[in-house]
Amino acid sequence: MTATTPVLDARLRKALGEQTIELPSWAFGNSGTRFKVFGTPGTPRDPYEKIADAAQVHRYTGLAPRVSLHVPWDLVDDFSDLARHAKEHGVTIGMINSNLFQDDDYKLGSLTHSDPAVRRKAVAHHVQCIDVMRATGSKELKVWLPDGTNYPGQDSIRARQDRLAESLAEIYAELDDDHRMVLEYKFFEPAFYHTDVPDWGTSLLHCLALGEKANVVLDTGHHAPGTNIEFIVAQLLRQGRLGAFDFNSRFYADDDLMAGAADPFQLFRIMHEIVQADALRPESGVNFMLDQCHNIEEKIPGQIRSVMNVQEATAKALLVDAEALDAAQRAGDVLGANGVLMDAYNTDVRGLLADLRVEQGRDADPMKAFAASGYAERIAAERVGGQQAGWGA
């Protein structure tokens, strides 16, 4: 094998064939900016239409068999019926995401609020999410906490951590034996002086205190500039506490752009750590998913492109010559070791992945196949009237 002629051997075929990437329901609504939100024809008007659109991504890539839901954005009267609808479209319900950032009561915090009544309300919301998990067959609850303060002295940093620990413990106690909780972190926004879960260390400490069913979720856009994200990935994998990824790209902050768009080399480096740790397998417990918003680009093609970008980074990571890399590292061959990585990264894997899709009975080019399907034109004509799904709906 050379850097320019990859071969789809049995090892690659198996590893790539097992890879799955979960899609966020909110990516198919109108969202994605702090300024104007640009709507598009055919935008879903309810969770059923979101799932139908997400199923198109799976249809053309074969990589996206699960859809994350967001409560209350995706509330329906009968979640078992929504799960049935998903199955009919060839996908299943994935993680259930809670919402603690759009209620007036949470102005000064939710799970960390000084008022016990507000904390009880926030805990009850998560119990509601767990009920949704039971109704849909979901096994994972994702908690992202926007809590924090804007000014020094506004509240006790330590007391807020104590309240958070108590609130999380109450939620954790409600989980079924086969459920998991993943705790997300973000170093700033919407709070600016301090954030209650600003980094992976804080998330990990809370997860360790909760128990084996609690793990860290890493959003690739939730870090300060210059952060070595693959180092965090390696550390969490070492501890067996990397529960999930939220893949997206950022240039300046939490931009939620398409995965691999801003720094494809970073995405490759992250996937290299995943492959090294043998964490690509489904049984590893790491859930790979997207967390993106599409504002100026078409939503379904944006998700297809993102899934393909993650797959390409994964294929390149699988092409790293592990034996040669280990030998160079042990020999202290700095440039040789770096060269092994760069050879894999510089390999064009698009033909290899096209061959894999054809083997699987799919079109070699998912983007072109979707464009030719006429689906976008059909939903634009059919979805006239009603309220398009968007930020907060």
Image (cartoon, grey):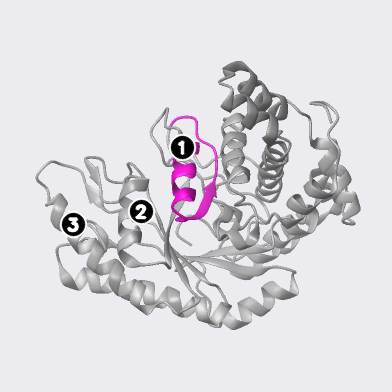
When asked about the image quadrant of residue 66, the answer is bottom right
Q: Looking at numbered disc 2 in the image, what kind of residue is underneath it?
A: Leu
Q: Residue at x 34, y 72 (%)?
A: 171
Q: Looking at numbered disc 1 in the image, what kind of residue is underneath it?
A: Phe
**Residue to which mark 1 is pinned:** 231
Specify the quadrant that holds the N terminus: top right
**Residue to which mark 3 is pinned:** 160
Above or below for 349 versus 380: above
Find numbered disc 3 in the image and state the secondary structure of the residue it sits on. helix
User: Residue 64 at what x, y percent from top left?
Assistant: 69, 58
> Nearer the viewer's eye, disc 1 or disc 3?
1
Q: Residue at x 55, y 42 (%)?
A: 248
Q: Earlier in the sequence, mark 3 or mark 2?
A: 3
Quick one: 312 or 255, which is closer to the camera?
312
Instruction: Report crowding for label 1: few under 14, some 14 to 19, many 20 or more residues within 10 A (C-alpha).
Output: few
> Nearer the viewer's eye, disc 3 or disc 2?
2
Q: Earlier in the sequence, mark 1 or mark 2?
A: 2
